[in-house]
Image (cartoon, grey):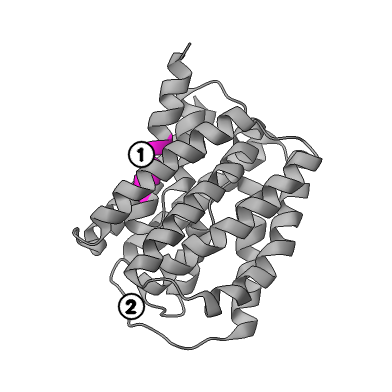
Amino acid sequence: MIEAVDILILLTGTFTGMLIGLVGIGGVLLLPILISTTNLDIHRIIPASSFSFFFTGLTATWMYRRFGWVRFRTSKHLVYGIIPGAIGGALLNPYVPELILIYLFSALLLLTGFRSFVGAKDQIESQDENKTLFLMVGVLVGFCSSLTGTAGPVMLIPTLMLFHHGLKQIIGLSQVIQIPIAVVASITYLLTTGVDLKLGLMLGFSQAAGVLVGALLARKINTVILKRITSLLLILSGLLLISKEWI
Protein backbone atom coordinates (compact mmCIF):
# COMPACT_ATOMS: atom_id res chain seq x y z
CA MET A 1 0.00 0.00 0.00
CA ILE A 2 1.33 3.40 -1.03
CA GLU A 3 1.55 5.86 1.85
CA ALA A 4 1.48 9.65 1.73
CA VAL A 5 5.21 9.87 2.43
CA ASP A 6 5.91 7.60 -0.56
CA ILE A 7 3.98 9.96 -2.84
CA LEU A 8 5.96 12.92 -1.50
CA ILE A 9 9.21 11.05 -2.13
CA LEU A 10 8.24 10.20 -5.72
CA LEU A 11 7.06 13.74 -6.48
CA THR A 12 10.24 15.19 -5.00
CA GLY A 13 12.38 12.81 -7.05
CA THR A 14 10.54 13.64 -10.27
CA PHE A 15 10.80 17.39 -9.64
CA THR A 16 14.51 17.35 -8.82
CA GLY A 17 15.17 14.99 -11.72
CA MET A 18 13.55 17.43 -14.14
CA LEU A 19 15.81 20.20 -12.85
CA ILE A 20 18.86 17.95 -13.32
CA GLY A 21 17.80 17.30 -16.89
CA LEU A 22 17.16 20.98 -17.55
CA VAL A 23 20.17 22.74 -16.04
CA GLY A 24 22.32 20.10 -14.36
CA ILE A 25 21.43 21.19 -10.82
CA GLY A 26 18.52 19.63 -8.97
CA GLY A 27 19.67 16.84 -6.67
CA VAL A 28 20.80 19.42 -4.15
CA LEU A 29 17.13 20.15 -3.42
CA LEU A 30 16.39 16.59 -2.29
CA LEU A 31 17.59 17.04 1.28
CA PRO A 32 15.80 20.31 2.18
CA ILE A 33 12.54 19.22 0.53
CA LEU A 34 12.46 15.80 2.20
CA ILE A 35 13.44 17.22 5.59
CA SER A 36 10.71 19.88 5.33
CA THR A 37 7.95 17.54 4.13
CA THR A 38 8.71 14.23 5.86
CA ASN A 39 9.99 12.92 9.19
CA LEU A 40 12.93 11.13 7.60
CA ASP A 41 16.25 11.42 9.43
CA ILE A 42 19.04 13.31 7.66
CA HIS A 43 21.45 10.39 8.11
CA ARG A 44 18.91 8.16 6.36
CA ILE A 45 18.29 10.57 3.49
CA ILE A 46 21.94 11.29 2.63
CA PRO A 47 23.06 7.69 1.87
CA ALA A 48 19.83 7.02 -0.06
CA SER A 49 20.16 10.19 -2.12
CA SER A 50 23.80 9.38 -2.89
CA PHE A 51 22.66 5.95 -4.11
CA SER A 52 19.88 7.48 -6.24
CA PHE A 53 22.31 9.70 -8.16
CA PHE A 54 23.71 6.62 -9.89
CA PHE A 55 20.44 6.41 -11.81
CA THR A 56 20.31 10.12 -12.64
CA GLY A 57 23.96 10.07 -13.69
CA LEU A 58 23.45 7.21 -16.13
CA THR A 59 20.27 8.68 -17.58
CA ALA A 60 21.58 12.24 -17.92
CA THR A 61 24.91 11.10 -19.38
CA TRP A 62 23.09 9.07 -22.01
CA MET A 63 20.85 11.99 -22.91
CA TYR A 64 23.57 14.64 -22.92
CA ARG A 65 25.86 12.44 -24.99
CA ARG A 66 23.18 12.47 -27.65
CA PHE A 67 23.29 16.27 -27.50
CA GLY A 68 27.08 16.31 -27.86
CA TRP A 69 27.60 17.83 -24.38
CA VAL A 70 29.75 15.03 -22.90
CA ARG A 71 33.56 14.91 -23.18
CA PHE A 72 34.83 11.70 -21.56
CA ARG A 73 38.52 12.62 -21.99
CA THR A 74 38.13 15.58 -19.65
CA SER A 75 35.95 13.74 -17.15
CA LYS A 76 38.58 11.07 -16.37
CA HIS A 77 40.82 13.65 -14.67
CA LEU A 78 37.94 14.64 -12.40
CA VAL A 79 37.21 10.99 -11.56
CA TYR A 80 40.80 10.44 -10.31
CA GLY A 81 40.14 13.04 -7.61
CA ILE A 82 36.49 12.22 -7.01
CA ILE A 83 37.05 8.63 -5.86
CA PRO A 84 39.24 9.36 -2.79
CA GLY A 85 37.22 12.49 -2.05
CA ALA A 86 33.92 10.58 -2.04
CA ILE A 87 35.33 7.87 0.23
CA GLY A 88 36.52 10.48 2.72
CA GLY A 89 33.18 12.29 2.76
CA ALA A 90 31.18 9.10 3.29
CA LEU A 91 33.46 7.95 6.11
CA LEU A 92 33.20 11.30 7.90
CA ASN A 93 29.41 11.67 7.54
CA PRO A 94 28.33 9.49 10.52
CA TYR A 95 30.52 11.49 12.90
CA VAL A 96 29.18 14.92 11.93
CA PRO A 97 26.22 16.05 14.13
CA GLU A 98 22.90 16.59 12.31
CA LEU A 99 22.78 20.30 13.15
CA ILE A 100 26.24 20.90 11.67
CA LEU A 101 25.28 19.01 8.51
CA ILE A 102 22.16 21.15 8.15
CA TYR A 103 24.07 24.41 8.50
CA LEU A 104 26.85 23.26 6.19
CA PHE A 105 24.27 22.19 3.64
CA SER A 106 22.39 25.49 3.99
CA ALA A 107 25.60 27.43 3.41
CA LEU A 108 26.29 25.28 0.34
CA LEU A 109 22.82 26.02 -1.02
CA LEU A 110 23.13 29.76 -0.48
CA LEU A 111 26.64 30.07 -1.89
CA THR A 112 25.82 27.97 -4.93
CA GLY A 113 22.56 29.82 -5.50
CA PHE A 114 24.11 33.29 -5.34
CA ARG A 115 27.10 32.29 -7.45
CA SER A 116 24.93 30.64 -10.10
CA PHE A 117 22.52 33.58 -10.20
CA VAL A 118 25.31 36.12 -10.66
CA GLY A 119 27.06 33.98 -13.25
CA ALA A 120 23.94 32.88 -15.10
CA LYS A 121 25.26 34.10 -18.45
CA ASP A 122 26.86 31.30 -20.43
CA GLN A 123 30.62 31.31 -20.86
CA ILE A 124 32.70 30.86 -23.99
CA GLU A 125 33.54 27.20 -24.54
CA SER A 126 37.02 26.39 -23.25
CA GLN A 127 39.16 23.59 -24.63
CA ASP A 128 41.86 23.89 -21.96
CA GLU A 129 42.40 20.77 -19.84
CA ASN A 130 44.44 21.51 -16.74
CA LYS A 131 44.94 18.05 -15.23
CA THR A 132 46.00 19.38 -11.83
CA LEU A 133 42.99 21.71 -11.66
CA PHE A 134 40.55 18.94 -12.56
CA LEU A 135 42.17 16.59 -10.03
CA MET A 136 41.84 19.14 -7.20
CA VAL A 137 38.28 20.02 -8.20
CA GLY A 138 37.48 16.31 -8.29
CA VAL A 139 38.65 15.77 -4.70
CA LEU A 140 36.61 18.76 -3.49
CA VAL A 141 33.48 17.76 -5.39
CA GLY A 142 33.70 14.11 -4.35
CA PHE A 143 34.25 14.93 -0.68
CA CYS A 144 31.49 17.55 -0.36
CA SER A 145 28.98 15.58 -2.44
CA SER A 146 29.48 12.39 -0.46
CA LEU A 147 29.48 14.17 2.91
CA THR A 148 26.23 16.06 2.29
CA GLY A 149 24.44 13.58 0.02
CA THR A 150 24.28 16.03 -2.88
CA ALA A 151 24.89 15.36 -6.54
CA GLY A 152 28.22 16.40 -8.03
CA PRO A 153 26.84 19.24 -10.22
CA VAL A 154 26.01 21.48 -7.27
CA MET A 155 29.72 21.80 -6.55
CA LEU A 156 31.18 21.28 -10.03
CA ILE A 157 29.06 23.73 -12.03
CA PRO A 158 29.81 26.93 -10.05
CA THR A 159 33.45 25.87 -9.52
CA LEU A 160 34.23 25.37 -13.21
CA MET A 161 32.29 28.50 -14.13
CA LEU A 162 34.94 30.43 -12.21
CA PHE A 163 37.45 29.17 -14.77
CA HIS A 164 35.25 30.19 -17.72
CA HIS A 165 34.30 26.78 -19.02
CA GLY A 166 31.22 26.75 -21.23
CA LEU A 167 27.89 25.92 -19.62
CA LYS A 168 27.10 22.97 -21.91
CA GLN A 169 30.56 21.48 -21.34
CA ILE A 170 30.15 21.87 -17.57
CA ILE A 171 26.67 20.33 -17.52
CA GLY A 172 27.92 17.35 -19.54
CA LEU A 173 30.84 16.82 -17.16
CA SER A 174 28.64 17.20 -14.10
CA GLN A 175 26.40 14.34 -15.17
CA VAL A 176 29.28 11.97 -15.93
CA ILE A 177 30.91 12.47 -12.51
CA GLN A 178 27.67 11.69 -10.68
CA ILE A 179 28.21 8.02 -11.53
CA PRO A 180 31.56 7.40 -9.73
CA ILE A 181 30.48 9.63 -6.82
CA ALA A 182 27.30 7.61 -6.36
CA VAL A 183 29.09 4.25 -6.69
CA VAL A 184 31.92 5.06 -4.28
CA ALA A 185 29.70 6.81 -1.72
CA SER A 186 27.06 4.05 -1.82
CA ILE A 187 29.59 1.24 -1.35
CA THR A 188 31.17 3.12 1.55
CA TYR A 189 27.78 3.73 3.19
CA LEU A 190 26.78 0.07 2.66
CA LEU A 191 29.93 -1.07 4.44
CA THR A 192 29.52 1.38 7.33
CA THR A 193 26.13 2.87 8.24
CA GLY A 194 24.00 1.16 5.59
CA VAL A 195 21.68 2.45 2.84
CA ASP A 196 17.87 2.53 2.80
CA LEU A 197 17.52 0.74 -0.55
CA LYS A 198 13.76 1.28 -0.78
CA LEU A 199 14.16 5.04 -0.38
CA GLY A 200 17.16 5.06 -2.71
CA LEU A 201 15.35 3.15 -5.46
CA MET A 202 12.24 5.30 -5.18
CA LEU A 203 14.33 8.44 -5.52
CA GLY A 204 16.51 6.92 -8.24
CA PHE A 205 13.73 5.80 -10.57
CA SER A 206 11.58 8.90 -10.07
CA GLN A 207 14.56 11.19 -10.66
CA ALA A 208 15.61 9.24 -13.76
CA ALA A 209 12.12 9.71 -15.20
CA GLY A 210 12.31 13.42 -14.43
CA VAL A 211 15.75 13.66 -16.07
CA LEU A 212 14.36 12.30 -19.35
CA VAL A 213 11.65 14.97 -19.43
CA GLY A 214 13.97 17.76 -18.34
CA ALA A 215 16.69 16.88 -20.85
CA LEU A 216 14.20 16.89 -23.72
CA LEU A 217 13.02 20.34 -22.65
CA ALA A 218 16.58 21.63 -22.18
CA ARG A 219 17.08 22.14 -25.91
CA LYS A 220 13.88 24.18 -26.24
CA ILE A 221 13.94 26.47 -23.19
CA ASN A 222 16.36 29.35 -22.63
CA THR A 223 19.08 27.95 -20.37
CA VAL A 224 19.90 31.32 -18.80
CA ILE A 225 16.30 31.76 -17.61
CA LEU A 226 16.19 28.22 -16.25
CA LYS A 227 19.49 28.70 -14.47
CA ARG A 228 18.24 31.87 -12.78
CA ILE A 229 15.08 30.09 -11.62
CA THR A 230 17.11 27.19 -10.23
CA SER A 231 19.49 29.60 -8.48
CA LEU A 232 16.54 31.27 -6.75
CA LEU A 233 15.24 27.84 -5.69
CA LEU A 234 18.64 27.00 -4.19
CA ILE A 235 18.68 30.27 -2.23
CA LEU A 236 15.12 29.80 -0.97
CA SER A 237 15.83 26.20 0.04
CA GLY A 238 18.90 27.28 2.01
CA LEU A 239 16.91 29.95 3.83
CA LEU A 240 14.05 27.56 4.58
CA LEU A 241 16.43 24.93 5.92
CA ILE A 242 18.10 27.43 8.25
CA SER A 243 14.80 28.93 9.43
CA LYS A 244 13.53 25.44 10.26
CA GLU A 245 16.18 25.21 12.97
CA TRP A 246 15.26 28.64 14.38
CA ILE A 247 11.55 27.92 14.76
Q: Is residue 34 magenta?
A: no
Q: Nearer the viewer, residue 112 or 194?
A: 194
**Residue matched to label 2:** 123
Residue 193 place in picture, x, y as percent: 77, 36
Single out the mark in the foreground, 1 or 2.
1
Task: Name the N-terminal-most of marks 1 and 2.
Answer: 1
Check the image and name the residue furthest to the right: 192
Residue 38 place in picture, x, y as percent: 50, 22
Residue ID at (61%, 37%): 48
In the rendered view, does 159 fall on the left or right side of 196?
left
In the rendered view, does 229 fall on the left or right side of 17?
left
Residue 176 place in picture, x, y as percent: 52, 63
Instruction: Kindly indicate the quadrant of the structure image that contains residue 208.
Output: top left
**Residue matched to label 1:** 15
Query: Vertical placement of 216 versus 197: above or below?
Result: below
The range drawn in magenta is: 13-19
Q: Say which element carries label 1.
A: helix
Residue ID at (45%, 65%): 157
| Residue 21 visible | yes
Q: Say which element carries label 2.
A: loop
Q: Is residue 16 magenta?
A: yes
User: Magenta segment, principal secondary structure?
Assistant: helix
Residue ID at (41%, 33%): 12
Circle 2: residue type = Gln
Query: Vertical placement of 242 versus 147: above or below?
Result: above
Circle 1: residue type = Phe
